[in-house]
Image: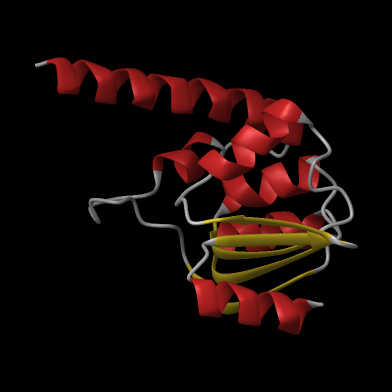
Amino acid sequence: MLSQLKVIQNNAGYTLCAQKAQRLFVSHERGIAPIMRQLARDPLYFQDCVIIDRVIGKAAAMLYHRSQAAYIHACLMSEGAEAYLRCHHIAFSYDELCPYIINRTHDGMCPMEACVQETEDAEAAYHALKKKLASLQSQINQSERM
């Protein structure tokens, strides 16, 4: 299943592919937004899924863990995500490991990864990430009005 998902991801340029039996979820979106959207609808949306995500930081790792994913593969994984998954005995692999996920302006840590640095609680992380996304969206909306 993992090799099939890699082919699907590469051929269509998806950032995220998740499969469970005959159900396939795909997204072209960056970041944790597509994960959060699915988890808002169903906290166990990714339960028993095999996941391939281009970039997995600690935030995404915690969200997939909260949703009880069966297996997680990242093209790029942060050391924080690796440590979290290993500590929680979640099956995973990656192509490349990095110290942390860089933000989109390439001048620091991804705000989502920074948001969960100090917690190991997946439920607390979900709520903190939800607030952080809302705050960032509010900032974007305000800057667009100016």
Q: Is residue 117 visible?
A: no
Q: Residue 144 location in percent, x, y?
A: 17, 23
Q: Locate residue 131 relative to residue 1 in the image: left or right.
A: left
Observer-nearest of 106 and 1: 1
* Res 41 quadrant in image: top right
Q: In what quadrant of the picture does the N terminus appear?
A: bottom right
Q: Compared with residue 65, is residue 10 higher up or lower down, i.e. above or below?
A: below
Q: Locate residue 46 relative to residue 55 in the image: left or right.
A: right
* Res 56 quadrant in image: bottom right
Observer-nearest of 11 and 36: 11
Seen as rendered, the residue at the extreme left is 146
Q: Locate residue 56 relative to residue 146 in the image: left or right.
A: right
Colour scheme of the picture: secondary structure
Q: Locate residue 93 relative to residue 53 in the image: left or right.
A: right
Q: Compared with residue 40, is residue 138 higher up or lower down, i.e. above or below?
A: above
Identify which residue is drawn at 66% across, 63% down: 82
Identify which residue is drawn at 68% across, 27% down: 40
- In this figure, what is the number of numbered marks? 0
Observer-nearest of 91 and 53: 53
Q: Is residue 76 visible?
A: yes
Q: Compared with residue 103, is residue 121 higher up or lower down, i.e. above or below?
A: above
Q: In what quadrant of the picture does the C terminus appear?
A: top left
Q: Residue 39 location in percent, x, y?
A: 71, 34
Identify which residue is drawn at 47% across, 65% down: 99
Q: Residue 46 location in percent, x, y?
A: 79, 48
Identify which residue is drawn at 63% across, 82% down: 7
